[in-house]
């Protein structure tokens, strides 16, 4: 169990991490407080202080006893004289002599008296906006006090106590208030306190998903992978293939490994990937997960079940006119429309035409039969589904698969949105495997940590690399992971029914990258073109179908 010192160290580190994450808010708060203090200081009217010092002595004898008695008496009386200095008895003569337009009470507010410890010295300090008048009033008050004490202590005889001016008041040359240096120091302290408070308050009020620890504590669901952020995700959706040594690729391998130890529903080797909101990276996560699973020797089918805004065919340069919906309405068989990829063992089933009733068609018996057939023919089936909060399609599909992964984009989705998404899955008793925290910042408190020297940061890749990839292909995926099955070349062999006369290979486009482009069968056509050429040219438009957009999922 951690010691108290260890807990204090952890708490201090948390506060420092909060300041590091919220440094902009903290800095703005600090500057605002500092500016406010400086402004308040400059708006104040300068005041000056002048001090007159009096020595209190008694008329005692010359013996030691008399001297001690006199000192003791003076010490007892000096506090009374300090109070006497601000009474009307002393101040009224001052007002008359100096011609002041104020009352004794107002003048008393300008005067303060102090007695330094262990001394017989009385200090009379006057504060005024006029430095000359402050010195004049201080001297006049001291003189009036001398006279009043002499009268009070004489009793018709010689006064037993005498006040002597030892330091007359001098005209001050600099204001006593406001003190810019002092106020600046106070402003710095207040600014730092306000900055820390602002950072902590903002962190407490911010309900966006940031850290895996918060997710596990809040939702009691395991975070089975943390995918670090890469600014090239849109241009390189299959980063596990394009940059296999990057930290992003290694994170997807971690996800693959963790999934191997998580039990799926009995007889269903299928995984659904969804998210709470659009643009959380569920499609790119599905693509990369399918790639790394196939690399490990598994036969994988990747299905684009986002029939609202399908994107896999855009990302991977595939035929999108025939696919999942084509099979579900009985226009083609599964083996006729799946498209093999360059990654050995990876096939893709695109969405096909967008139907007017996605939820109904995904929840149909035909979809259940298709998944049963796919899990029988493939080792793993990975399904890319729409966001949970937008539509009910993923909820319907979650009952048909072996488990669901919810992709949560760091610093994008809010906790209550993720909570609602998980509750929708729990309502239908879906098996939730865990959460994939995507696009984790590479700096800050919630940053991704990976220090193994063999991995490189894939975020350094630029868009120019995408355009140059066709002319300078990287090492093929077949060389990376030789197949455990298939023909002598190690390549996944397409069914014989798909073979035809060879044709020249088409020119690669922006999305047809090494390791991403689909395998061209012997006919030179894509599978969908071989068997459904008439469908793709005549029946690709559904009545009331929604036009397809290219979006970042």
Image (spheres, rainbow, N blue to C red):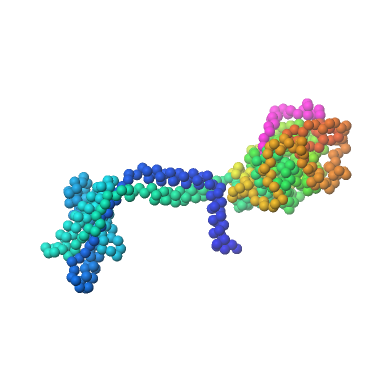
Q: Quadrant of the C terminus?
A: top right
Say left or right for 269 vs 131.
right
In the image, is residue 401 above or below residue 315? below
Residue 115 is situated, as x and y percent measured from the top left of the image, at: 28, 60
Residue closest to the eye, 272 or 462: 462
* Residue 410 occupies quadrant: top right
* Image quarter hosting the N terminus: bottom right
Vertical arrangement, residue 232 with respect to residue 251, above or below: above
Can see residue 292? Answer: yes
Q: Residue at x 19, y 46 (%)?
A: 99
Residue at horizontal 57%, vertical 57%? 10
Q: Position of residue 210 (x, y in %)?
A: 60, 47
Instruction: Please provide percent x and percent y for residue 445.
Output: 59, 50
User: In terms of image quadrants, where is residue 552?
Assistant: top right
As for residue 542 lying within the magenta part, the answer is yes
Magenta span covers which residues? 533-553
How far from the left and from the top, in percent, is residue 357?
70, 33
Residue at left 81%, top 44%?
A: 478
User: Between 451 and 374, which is closer to the camera in this rendering?
Assistant: 451
> Magenta part mainly helix, strand or loop?
loop
- Residue 55 drawn in magenta: no
Q: In the shown orientation, is residue 41 left or right of residue 289?
A: left
Q: Nearer the viewer, residue 339 or 100?
A: 100
Q: Is residue 123 left or right of residue 372?
A: left
Instruction: Name the outermost residue toward the left.
Output: 156
């Amino acid at each position: 169990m951690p010691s108290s010192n260890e807990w204090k160290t952890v708490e201090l580190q948390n506060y420092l991490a909060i300041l590091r994450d919220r440094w902009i808010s903290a800095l703005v708060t600090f500057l605002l407080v500092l500016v406010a203090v400086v402004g308040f200081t400059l708006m104040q009217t300068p005041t000056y202080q002048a001090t007159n010092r009096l020595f209190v002595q008694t008329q005692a004898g010359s013996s030691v006893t008399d001297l001690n008695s006199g000192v003791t008496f003076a010490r007892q009386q000096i506090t009374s004289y300090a109070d006497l200095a601000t009474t009307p008895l002393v101040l009224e003569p001052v007002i008359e002599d100096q011609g002041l337009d104020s009352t004794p009470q107002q003048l008393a507010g300008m005067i303060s008296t102090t007695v330094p410890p262990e001394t017989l010295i009385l200090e009379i300090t006057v504060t005024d906006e006029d430095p000359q008048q402050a010195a004049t009033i201080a001297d006049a008050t001291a003189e009036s006090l001398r006279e009043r004490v002499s009268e009070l202590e004489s009793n018709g005889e010689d006064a037993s106590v005498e006040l002597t001016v030892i330091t007359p008041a001098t005209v001050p040359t600099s204001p006593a208030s406001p003190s810019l240096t002092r106020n600046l120091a106070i402003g710095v302290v207040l600014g730092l306190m306000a900055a820390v408070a602002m950072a902590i308050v903002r962190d407490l009020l911010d309900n966006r998903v940031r850290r895996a620890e918060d997710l596990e504590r809040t939702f009691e669901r395991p975070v089975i992978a943390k995918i670090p952020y890469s600014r090239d995700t849109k241009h390189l959706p299959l980063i596990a293939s394009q940059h296999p040594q990057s930290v992003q690729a290694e994170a997807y391998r971690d996800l693959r490994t963790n999934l191997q130890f998580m039990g799926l529903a009995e007889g269903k080797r299928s995984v659904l990937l969804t998210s709470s909101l659009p643009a959380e990276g569920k499609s790119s996560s599905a693509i990369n997960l399918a790639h790394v699973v196939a690399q490990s020797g598994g036969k994988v089918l990747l299905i684009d079940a986002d029939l609202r805004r399908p994107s896999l065919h855009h990302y991977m340069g595939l035929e999108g006119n025939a696919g999942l919906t084509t099979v579900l309405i009985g226009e083609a068989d599964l083996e006729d429309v799946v498209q093999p990829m360059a990654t050995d063992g990876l096939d893709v089933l695109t969405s096909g035409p967008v139907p007017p009733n996605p939820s109904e068609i995904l929840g149909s018996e035909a979809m259940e039969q298709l998944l049963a057939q796919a899990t029988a023919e493939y080792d793993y089936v990975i399904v890319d589904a729409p966001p949970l909060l937008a539509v009910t399609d993923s909820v319907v599909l979650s009952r048909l698969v072996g488990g669901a992964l919810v992709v949560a984009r760091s610093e994008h989705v809010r906790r209550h949105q993720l909570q609602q998404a998980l509750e929708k899955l729990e309502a239908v008793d879906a098996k939730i495997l865990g959460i994939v925290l995507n696009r984790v910042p590479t700096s800050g408190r919630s940053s991704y940590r990976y220090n193994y020297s063999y991995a490189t940061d894939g975020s350094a890749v630029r868009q120019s690399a995408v355009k140059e990839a066709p002319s300078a292909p990287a090492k093929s995926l077949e060389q990376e992971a030789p197949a455990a099955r298939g023909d002598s070349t190690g390549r996944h062999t397409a069914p014989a029914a798909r073979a035809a006369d060879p044709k020249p290979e088409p020119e690669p486009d922006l999305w047809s990258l090494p390791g991403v482009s689909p395998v061209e069968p012997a006919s030179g056509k894509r599978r969908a073109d071989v068997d459904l050429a008439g469908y793709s040219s005549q029946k690709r438009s559904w009545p009331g179908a929604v036009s397809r957009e290219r979006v970042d999922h």
